[in-house]
Amino acid sequence: MLVVCNHIDDVDLGFVLTALPRRFRHRLAAAAGGESMEALRTPPVDRSFMGKIVDRTKWILGSALLNIFPLPRQAGFRESFQYAGDAVDRAYSVLVFPEGRHTTTGEVQPFRAGIGILADELKIPIVPMRIDGLFEVKKAGKRMAPPGKIKVTIGPPVRFAPGRHPEEIARELQKRVEEL
């Protein structure tokens, strides 16, 4: 399945994994900001020696333990879409945050058309998810949330007829996430 979820913070993946049934948790490939991942993989030359080690360690752990793959905003997304297709062929589900960046207002930001392209190409059920309460915790500057403060809602799977316009699919998925 293709999982689409609103994007609040770097910890969203943990909440999605916790909310998913156990049988899906260990076979999930999660898309992350390609430019951010590349900066971790190849830190800038002016970064300190220890900073470079920390960045590369984050990249290795994210890739190896969380099965994160890069999904760039600007260029190179074809390789990422190919990776997502290969993951599906290996019986993995794929998680994408179609907004492309963290929300700054707490509201769901417009979904990028790339999710429509990916949905049309993969031809698998799409499961909308929504995280609520995390933005308020983040905005308050807290590291921990009281029990029950953060809620993850999983919507019913949806499929789209082949050939629908990618922007139309993106708008429909955004609507479904907002309505959860």
Image: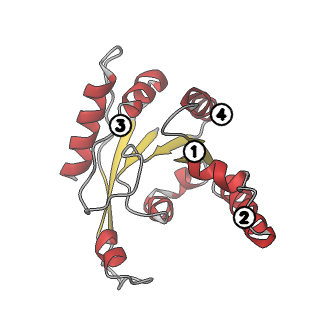
Marked residue nearer the N-terminal end (2 or 3) = 2
* Numbered circle sitting on residue 112: 3
Q: Nearer the viewer, mark 1 or mark 4?
A: 1
Residue 121 x, y percent position in the rendering: 47, 22
Q: CA distance from mark 3 to mark 4?
A: 26 Å
Q: Secondary structure at mark 2?
A: loop
Give the left or right position of residue 175, taking residue 15 as reference.
left
> Which of 18/21 is in front?
18
Q: CA distance from mark 1 to mark 3?
A: 15 Å
Q: Nearer the viewer, mark 3 or mark 4?
A: 3
Q: Secondary structure at mark 4?
A: loop
* Crowd band around label 3 with a 10 angstrom C-alpha radius: few (<14), some (14–19), many (20+): some
Kind of residue sitting beneath label 1: Gly
Query: Which residue position is annotated with label 1?
Result: 34
- Say which residue appears at 33% left-offset and 72% top-offset: 150
Marked residue nearer the N-terminal end (1 or 4) = 1
- Say which residue appears at 31% left-offset and 69% top-offset: 135
Q: CA distance from mark 2 to mark 1?
A: 19 Å
Query: Which residue position is annotated with label 4?
Result: 90
- Say which residue appears at 25% left-offset and 26% top-offset: 168
* Crowd band around label 2 with a 10 angstrom C-alpha radius: few (<14), some (14–19), many (20+): few
Whether residue 29 is visible, yes or no, is no
Query: Which residue position is annotated with label 2?
Result: 47
> Which of 68/148 is in front?
68
Q: Are marks 3 and 4 in contact (CB under 8 Å)?
A: no
